[in-house]
Image (cartoon, rainbow, N blue to C red):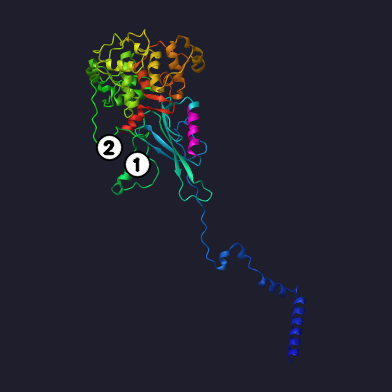
Amino acid sequence: MLYCKRLVVYLSSVVILSSLTACANSPTAKNWENSLAADSRLQNNPAILGANQSPQTTPQPQPTVQLPADFPSYIPIYPNSQLQEVIPGADGQSTARWQSIDPSNFITSFYRSQFGANNWQIVQQPSEDTGTFEARRNNLLVRVTIQPKSVTNATPNQSQTSTELRIDYSPNGVAFASPIPSTDTTPTPNPTSTTNSEVASNIPQPGSPDFIGPVLPDNNSAPTSTPTPTNTLPSTATNTQTAQQFSDVSKAPQQLQRYIQDLGTLGVLTVNSNNQAKSSNTGLFEPNKVITRREYARWLVAANNAMYTNNPAKQIRTVSETAQPAFSDVPKTNPDFAFIQGLAEAGIIPSTLSGDSTEVLFRPDAPLTREQLLLWKLPLDTRAALPAANLEAVKQTWGFQDAGKIDSRALRAVLADFQNGEQSNIRRVFGFTTLFQPKRTVTRAEAAAALWYFGTQGDGISAADVLKGKT
């Protein structure tokens, strides 16, 4: 029985296959084939299958930040950086901020090279591999701040660190009032919840390069008494000067005006007691007036001690009542005796105390010359013995056509000043020149420019640094 059923099924299949083969080319077969074919619409429209398809959105391009049309073209821009934003400011000052994946020391080296090669006057050098430059060219003041940043939630292919590059520029040469706040959005801790140890850790301590202010006595130690000197320098040699505002600074060369303003704010551009009332009433600096030797001696001591108010080891010390005058024309009754005598006893100016038997007269009212300005200032910049120098060495370094007219003693100061690079007094005061004119008199504005910075390139302090610390 089972065999018969299988035979019937087999015979039925043969009949059907035969029918299909016979009708393969018939219209009926074609219709059947088409009905069984896949729907071609499924290839172009998958939604027909009923799948839950999310709508497709076209990404919108992000707006590109561009520099304003008035951005000075000669401000160097680090190549491997992307502009993030431009912030207009007051008085024509503006800020542009870039981001770079390069290390901060690479960017610092780039700007040090660019400023040095393109006739920029370096006003402030960064103290380390990173920090802040301030440079001036023509009437443009630029501040470049280079700050390493950490990247949070970085993607697998993204660098863990980046560098923020911020350029503040002032087309009118107006000094920046204060640093532009950082764009870091890290919340500031609540002062009420900050412990005393946390506060102390954030405040620069004595010995730190950022510390500004007198060293306060330890409350836990026994009080000590400081002997009062029998004779001290006048108050103009300390850091208690009164800020001075001069009404005729605009008469000075534009490149020197900032130096006068900063030193005036420090209160070191003083006059002697005989002319104090006159100066206070008129408010005149007389920048183009020739400065006398006594005035420069007074400013030199006052400026040095104001720069190093927290470093007694670098201050010019006072003189005692029993000091014998180093110069016969500067007796103890001279109003500038304390300054001139202090410089002589420190060996800053030539005198019989330093072994120069011919220097018995100081000539306080004689005009100061360029070579004298260098000879007195450089020991306070280098804080070391001046190098040996000869005429040929000065010619090869500075290229002065009139090097042969420089006094043999001043040659050492001129050569040492060349080693200060962009912070040299000659470059800051006189700009680019192939004639030193050593016997030419110095103006009050030029003297102020020389006293605005003490130290060597990369290791010094300016009046602007002191003012920022005060603020």
Residue 134 shown in magenta: no
Q: Does 18 sit above or below residue 259? A: below
Q: Amino acid at mark 1?
A: Asn
Q: Which residue is found at the position 51% from the left and 46% from the top?
A: 159
Quote the CA–CA distance across marks 2 and 1. 19 Å
- The label nearer to you, 2 versus 1, is 2
Residue receiving disc 1: 202
Q: Which residue is found at the position 75% from the left and 77% from the top?
A: 20
Instruction: Please provide the residue range marked out in magenta.
Output: 103-115
Judge left or right: residue 468 versus residue 234: right
Residue receiving disc 2: 218
In the image, residue 329 lies at what x, y percent?
29, 9
Task: Please tell me which residue lies in front, 388 or 421.
Answer: 388
Name the residue at the front extreme: 222
Secondary structure beneath dot 2 equals loop
Q: Does 106 sit above or below residue 434? A: below
Name the residue at the bottom extreme: 1
